[in-house]
Amino acid sequence: MARWLLATAMLASCAAAAEQRDWAFVQSVGGMAIETPYATAAGVMLPVRVNVSGTERITTEPRALNSGLAVKVDASRDGDAVALRVTTVVAGPGRHASSGDVPLGNLEPGRYAIVFVEPKGGRVPVGEIAVP
């Protein structure tokens, strides 16, 4: 019984582990789109659309379905660019397959390239935003 519980706990912890995804994965589930950023009291927010379930066409036709994944999109400033990373985890309470607004902090006004950062290096251009 103890071995079964240990094996179950190990499987659960592996399944819950976050995995940074590459551009090929994002394209396989329907793509990614960025929308117009907006200011809040907490800083600039960037609406990012990606749905890892594979049930929605965002910029390309989805080719893969994932019923148990949730998505997290992180952003960081990289000079005159904003770098986006997509991570998936096992779906659960408070975790969703579709992304939403990504906080960018207090960006200075100007134009920023939006790039997708590959887990093993490399960047894919996604678009450009203007922060007023």
Image (cartoon, rainbow, N blue to C red):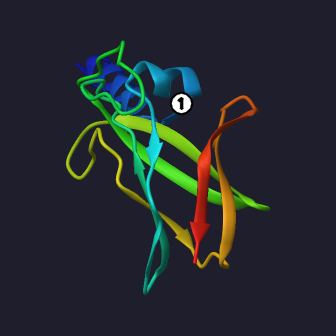
Q: Which residue is mark 1?
A: 21
Toward the top, the furthest residue is: 63
Q: Position of residue 94 (x, y in %)?
A: 23, 53
> Residue sitting at 66 percent across and 32 percent down?
119
Q: Position of residue 111 (x, y in %)?
A: 68, 65
> Residue sitting at 59 percent across and 79 percent down?
106
- Left or right of residue 33, residue 74 in this image: right
Is residue 64 depicted above or below 106 in this figure?
A: above
Residue nearer the viewer, 30 or 99? 30
> Residue sitting at 42 percent across and 31 percent down?
59
- Left or right of residue 78, residue 21 in this image: left
The image quadrant that residue 1 belongs to is top left
Is residue 34 depicted above or below 106 in this figure?
A: above
Per the image, label 1 sits on a secondary structure element best described as loop
Toward the bottom, the furthest residue is: 41
Residue nearer the viewer, 35 or 51? 35
- Left or right of residue 21, residue 128 in this image: right
Q: Position of residue 124 (x, y in %)?
A: 67, 34
**Amino acid type shown at disc 1:** Arg
Say which quadrant the C terminus sits in.
bottom right
Q: Position of residue 83 (x, y in %)?
A: 65, 51
